[in-house]
Amino acid sequence: MSKQTTIGSDFSVSGTGLHYNFPVNVKVKPAPAYTSYVFRRADLNDFEIPASPERVTHVSYATTLMKSGVMIATVEHLLSALMGCGVDNAIIEVDSVEAPILDGSSAPWVDLIEQVGIVELQAPRAYLRVLKRVEASEKDRVMSIEPADEFRITCLIDFNHPMIGEQRREIIIRPGDYSKEIAPARTFGFVEEIETLRQNGLARGGSLENAIALTRDGILNQEPLRFDDEFVRHKILDIIGDLALAGMPVLGHVRASRSGHGLHTMLLSTLLRDREAWEVVNGGENHQ
Ligand SMILES: [Zn+2]
């Protein structure tokens, strides 16, 4: 598809936030070309917070955007669904501080997007094409992006847990593959860490309905894993959501090893700051 897109009509959903546990109503609306993704706080006179890397504030356990002291937390799964489904432009109205966690994956968002459909706009799709390799690292966490003709992610996670261990997966992000291979993967957390997180004001809305809860040697959830390697798939889901802050699809190959939201957004900022490392190209142009 070489034209920009938006959704066919509005859709709404209600839920609660994973970290702050406030009830929230969301309405996602079609938007004109070159909008990218813009959040609107319906409870604060429609105050707008564009989804862009300069607006990233907290990155521990979720990606939170802030503008002039107004925030919208845990945006990565919804942004991942929009980007993964090939929706370039959308207005996202929320009436609280955090996007709803729903089932902890982006599958419910994908279902809603598929129900209203995706429509083309009269503007060429712009891509952020990577021209040279850029890296970001933090202790043993490393992430890089290098030139490629598609959006490809190679991801490695390594957790000392019998159900995870080392998991590696590579995927080229295409709408159909995203909804089947990545969207259903749920977020996960360690039961041991829950108390500490809650003392820090996080994970207050976390439950077995919206996260895989890992005990020392198993999981608490009745629902079995949706994939043997659901954990690395969720990490890829998060990477797509965080890189969606670029505001346009990326042509590049991401390699991530033990990454988290902080590193994802650090890589994107590092890339965008280096004006020789990328260019914007229109869809349909020859990328060779
Ligand atoms: Zn996530």
Image (spheres, helix red, strand yellow):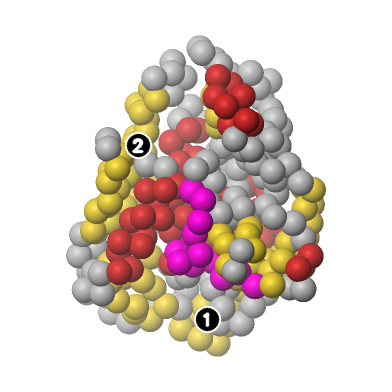
Tell me the distance, in whole angstroms, between the alpha carbons under discs 1 and 2: 33 Å
- Identified at 30% across, 61% down, the residue is 270
- Identified at 33% across, 68% down, the residue is 272
The x, y position of residue 86, in whole percent, is: 52, 65
Q: Which mark is residue 258?
A: 2
- Identified at 54% across, 46% down, the residue is 62
Q: Is the residue 225 above or below the residue 129 in the image?
A: above
Residue 178 relative to residue 39: left or right: left
List the residue tagged with mark 1: 34
Q: Is the residue 135 above or below the residue 43 in the image?
A: above
Is residue 54 on the magenta stretch?
Answer: yes
Identify which amino acid the numbered label 2 is placed on. Answer: Arg
Question: In the figure, residue 209 lies in which quadrant?
Answer: top right
Query: Which residues fall within the magenta stretch?
Result: 48-59
- Identified at 25% across, 69% down, the residue is 274
| Element assignment for label 1 | loop
